[in-house]
Image (cartoon, rainbow, N blue to C red):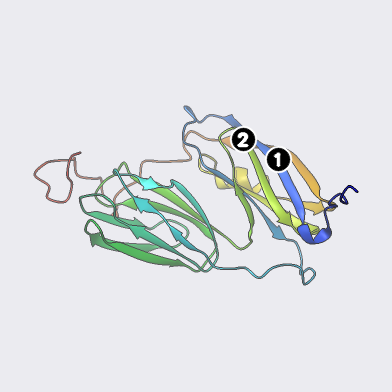
Amino acid sequence: MLGALAVPSAAQGVNVTGRVAYYGDANPRTGVSAVVWLVPAAPQASDQPALKPMDAVLRQKNKAFEPHLLVVTKGSSVQFPNLDPWFHNVFSLFNGKKFDLGLYEAGTSRTVHFDREGVSYIFCNIHPEMSAVVVVVSSPYYAVVARNGEFSIAGVPPGRYGLHVWNENSLPDSLEALTREVELNGTMHSVGTLSVREAADAKSQHKNKYGQDYEPASPNNPVYTQP
């Protein structure tokens, strides 16, 4: 006798899919980071899980942050281990969580508690080529967009949600215009293609934590070591 076919239930939630397409002035479009997330439009049934803080890691290795884009829920902690054989000084002074971890050596780590929603641009005060982004959301329903533009958010309880998009090469007004409400039912829901406008001036050259230009790399600088 054949076993009964598994029928998806409401408890399994809705699988939300879609695609992000880019247009605009940014060129070349390499290393772009984008996030899509859903926030309940109103208090819903008790099947909404509590928002759980995360313990995440943003590594410093080979004079780069890994990963470049990190998405965490509100209240999460992020470790910043230094895996390079030289000093780093991690800081963020823009928009989201503002912090300065100071100068710390190879093999050590610092931790930041991200207690508010927002986008934090992360830099190293010694190495200007290092940058990362921490996006803090107030919902467990999010996805980092793949390089081919596709995304999928699984297990979303049925109901009404606000759909939000963030993209590294877009201006805030353009992203705000993409926010909309979606009604989720059944087991599958496609939000279609989200057309994201990119701007060449969305990412400007950053300064160091003192608001000054970075000093040129030099072997005479004891904290900046050439590869």
Name above or below for residue 108 compared with residue 194.
below
Query: In the image shown, does 127 or 11 lie closer to the viewer?
Result: 11
Quote the CA–CA distance across marks 1 and 2: 8 Å
Q: Which mark is residue 149?
A: 2
Q: Which mark is residue 18?
A: 1
Figure quadrant of residue 141: bottom right
> Residue lying farthest right?
1
Which amino acid type is marked by label 2?
Gly
- Label 2: element kind: loop
Q: Earlier in the sequence, mark 1 or mark 2?
A: 1
Query: In the image shown, does 107 or 95 lie closer to the viewer?
Result: 107
| Residue 20 spot, x, y in % from top left | 64, 37
Residue drawn at x 77%, y 57% is 13
Q: Are marks 1 and 2 in contact (CB under 8 Å)?
A: no
Which amino acid type is marked by label 1?
Gly
- Is 126 left or right of 113, judged from the image as shown? left
| Residue 197 spot, x, y in % from top left | 60, 35
| Residue 6 spot, x, y in % from top left | 83, 51
Q: Crowding at label 1, few (<14), some or many (≥20) Cα neighbours within 10 Å?
A: some
